[in-house]
């Protein structure tokens, strides 16, 4: 993977992650977030900027993970194999963190389902995108 492909993969994963989180968390499950108003900080352009920057950092880190580790455990140029890697990463990392947060933070149960769906789809998309840029 060239440096250009690495950066392009990270940016694409960041954009996809931002879109996925917007769809699941803001569009589909935002109304359930409103049931726990004491939990949330006010939204602003600064918080959206930080969130988008974190999505790109996620893209960088996931692309690095895929390059160094994940590419050894998938069938080359097979989106289904990459998606399975994404599900395994979600189960190991995202699922545990989201459930752990839901135990201690006052979140609506339906909103937690939305966060889990967003996390799972984000990991799957990241693995597929990184697989597309891996040569």
Image (spheres, rainbow, N blue to C red):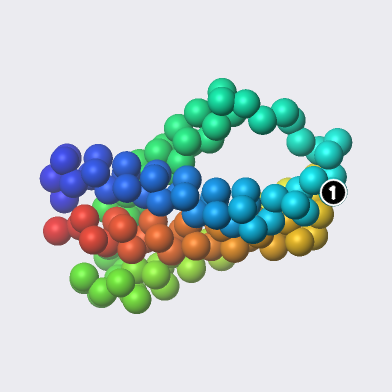
Q: Residue at x 42, y 72 (%)?
A: 84
Q: Residue at x 32, y 42 (%)?
A: 11
Observer-nearest of 89 and 25: 25
Q: Is residue 70 visible?
A: no
Based on the displayed image, in which of its 4 quarters is residue 82 positioned?
A: bottom left
**x, y percentage for residue 25?**
62, 52
Q: Residue at x 59, y 57 (%)?
A: 24
Q: Is residue 75 visible?
A: yes
Task: Count the numbered circles shown.
Answer: 1
**x, y percentage for residue 59?**
38, 45
**x, y percentage for residue 27?**
61, 53
Seen in the picture, residue 3 relative to 86 is either above or below; the reply is: above
Seen in the picture, residue 94 relative to 39 is either above or below; the reply is: below
Residue marked by disc 1: 35
**Left or right placement of residue 116 versus residue 78 in this view:** right
Q: Residue furthest top?
A: 46
Seen in the picture, residue 70 relative to 13 is either above or below; the reply is: below
**Left or right placement of residue 41 versus residue 115 in this view:** right
**x, y percentage for residue 90?**
53, 61
Observer-nearest of 116 and 96: 116
Q: Residue at x 13, y 45 (%)?
A: 2
- Element type at mark 1: loop
Question: In the picture, which quadrant includes the C terminus?
Answer: bottom left
């Amino acid at each position: 993977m060239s440096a250009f492909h690495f950066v392009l993969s990270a940016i694409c994963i960041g954009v996809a992650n931002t879109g996925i989180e917007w769809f699941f968390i803001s569009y589909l499950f935002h109304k359930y977030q409103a049931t726990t108003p004491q939990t949330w900080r006010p939204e602003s352009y600064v918080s959206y900027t930080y969130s988008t920057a974190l999505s790109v950092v996620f893209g960088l880190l996931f692309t690095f993970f895929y390059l160094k580790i994940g590419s050894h455990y998938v069938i080359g140029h097979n989106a289904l194999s990459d998606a399975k890697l994404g599900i395994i990463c979600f189960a190991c990392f995202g699922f545990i963190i989201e459930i752990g947060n839901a135990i201690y933070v006052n979140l609506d149960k339906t909103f937690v389902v939305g966060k889990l769906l967003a996390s799972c789809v984000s990991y799957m998309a990241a693995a597929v995108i990184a697989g597309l840029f891996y040569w």
